[in-house]
Image (cartoon, helix red, strand yellow):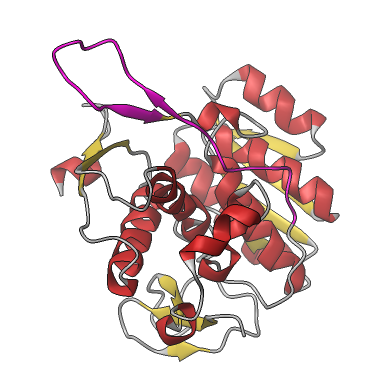
Amino acid sequence: MQPYTGLQCTQCHRFFPEEAPLGKCPECQGLLDTLLDETVLSYYSKRRLGNDARSMWKFHMFLPVKAGTIPVTAGEGDTPLRPVKSFPHLRNIWVKDETRNPTGTFKDRGASLAVTRLSQLKIRKLVLASEGNAGCSFALYSQMAGIRCHVYLPSDANNAKVELSKKLGAQVTKVKGTISEAGQHAAKAAEETGAYNASTFVTPFRHDGKGTMALEICQQRGWESPDYIVYPVGGGVGLVGMWKMFKILYRLGWIHKRPRIIAVQPTGCAPVVDA
């Protein structure tokens, strides 16, 4: 039995059993979150995880998919923890090396999960706004799943990311302005064409994939939570996903404490820090 039960709005708290491909809450436009039955989760054993596939999908029970799901995967996750030796006066500092993912970033985790779930929901075309990395990830996994992918990028997006997204089969449109304007174009395209909008905090199917970083860190440390997580934040999807998974692990008794999480953003764009 899979623990995933459906979606719940974080604002009006309405529950959706999620048989339709939802984005934001259809009642109040609030953000949706996936719900897991922790009673069912408690029947799983952390000791069995080492025998499963060497990817984030060893943690399928924590992800919003149906039982028996065949994931759309390119081997994302299971990335190493590397000791940091640059600060000799500080001990026991580790870096989670997400460059080992298929397209080189942690975005592959969210894209693998989202495309897997959207495939189950019979989505055949999707759009999203991206600074570049997420566009590459969704281009890869959409191509694997046979889903048409249209990526909207700000005009100053890295050309290498633009070209990789195109080579992976995505349609790419550069938009004058920032990621905000790209998001507006993606939303308009979704409304006009019926495509699914897989942009940050529009779809509820990305953050749990990125939350597998928290699960892996704890497993790699012998199910001992770190004291602190220092996390570079853009939109904050990974931040939310990791915090959620640390809370679940704590409630399940798999770890005995939750870490403090420090969000780091550039001074020119720091809404999470300011909030």
Q: Where residue 269 appears, x then y in whole percent?
A: 27, 33
Q: Position of residue 5 (x, y in %)?
A: 53, 85
Question: In the displayed structure, does residue 146 sit left or right of residue 185?
Answer: right
Residue 94 is one of the magenta-drawn residues: yes
Residue situated in front as seen by the camera: 28 or 257: 257
Can you name the residue that lies furthest to the right here? Answer: 146
Picture coordinates of residue 209, whole percent (x, y): 53, 55
Residue 162 vs 4, above or below: the answer is above
Residue at image position (61%, 34%) is: 101
Q: Nearer the viewer, residue 196 or 118?
A: 118
In the displayed structure, does residue 170 sit left or right of residue 189? right
What residue do we see at 63% from left, 47% from top? 55
Q: Is residue 189 visible to the viewer in this orientation of the structure?
A: no
**Between 142 and 29, which is closer to the camera in this rendering?**
142
Q: Give the residues in magenta.
A: 72-95
Q: Position of residue 2 (x, y in %)?
A: 60, 80
Looking at the picture, does residue 235 appear above or below residue 22? Answer: above
Query: Which residue does the image show at 41% across and 81% down from the upper left?
Result: 38
**Quarter location, residue 126:** bottom right
- Asked whether residue 106 appears in the rendered view, the answer is yes
Q: Residue at x 73, y 50 (%)?
A: 73
In the picture, the quarter occupied by the N terminus is bottom right
Above or below — where is 258 with respect to 217? Answer: below
For residue 267, side relative to residue 241 (left or right): left
Question: For residue 61, which quarter of the picture?
Answer: bottom right
Main secondary-structure element of the magenta-colored stretch: loop
Number of numbered discs present? 0
